Amino acid sequence: MQLGKIMKRVMGATIPPALFIGLTAYFGWNVMQGEHGLHSYAAQLHLLDEARSAQKDAAAEQEVWLRRVRGLKEGALDTDLLDERARSMQNLARQDEIVVPYGEHDHLY
């Protein structure tokens, strides 16, 4: 009888803490590695930064195209500038003209 009581007491003293430690370990692992854990959150923040960067690049490219399209409207076209630009792209110039080269990063439109 003594052995049964000792076994019962030992089991009663070890099983609840073991279950508590097991549950704590399980939830702790899920906090770090789980589908909605900290590592997943960091990965999502990285993807969000990449998406915002892509959005900024797209907005900048859209602004460039809008500026180009606005320059093509009839009221915005300057015939002298158009003539100058067409001849410079074809590498043609008259004898009496002064050619002013533009820098590589200077926007003409």
Image: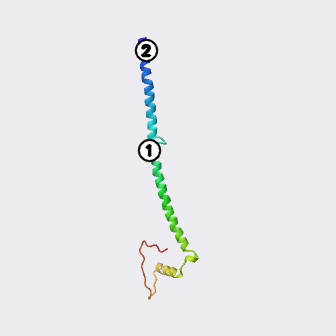
Q: CA distance from mark 1 to mark 2?
A: 47 Å
Residue depicted at x 52% and y 68%: 65
- Amino acid identity at mark 1: His
- Residue 23 placed where, x, y %? 46, 32
Return the mark for residue 39: 1
- Amino acid identity at mark 2: Lys
88 and 107: which is toward the camera: 107
Q: Does 107 appear above or below 87? A: above
The residue positioned farthest toward the right in the image shown: 74
Neighbor class of circle 2 (other Cα within 10 Å; few <14, some 14-19, many 20+) is few
- Residue 35 placed where, x, y %? 49, 42
Q: Does 20 appear above or below 47? A: above
Q: If the image is split into quadrants, where does the N terminus sit?
A: top left
Residue depicted at x 48% and y 58%: 54
Residue depicted at x 45% and y 43%: 38
The residue positioned farthest toward the bottom in the image shown: 96
Say which quarter of the image contains residue 98: bottom left
Circles 1 and 2: CB atoms closer than 8 Å: no
Say which quarter of the image contains residue 75: bottom right
Neighbor class of circle 1 (other Cα within 10 Å; few <14, some 14-19, many 20+) is some
* Residue assigned mark 2: 5
- Residue 66 placed where, x, y %? 54, 68
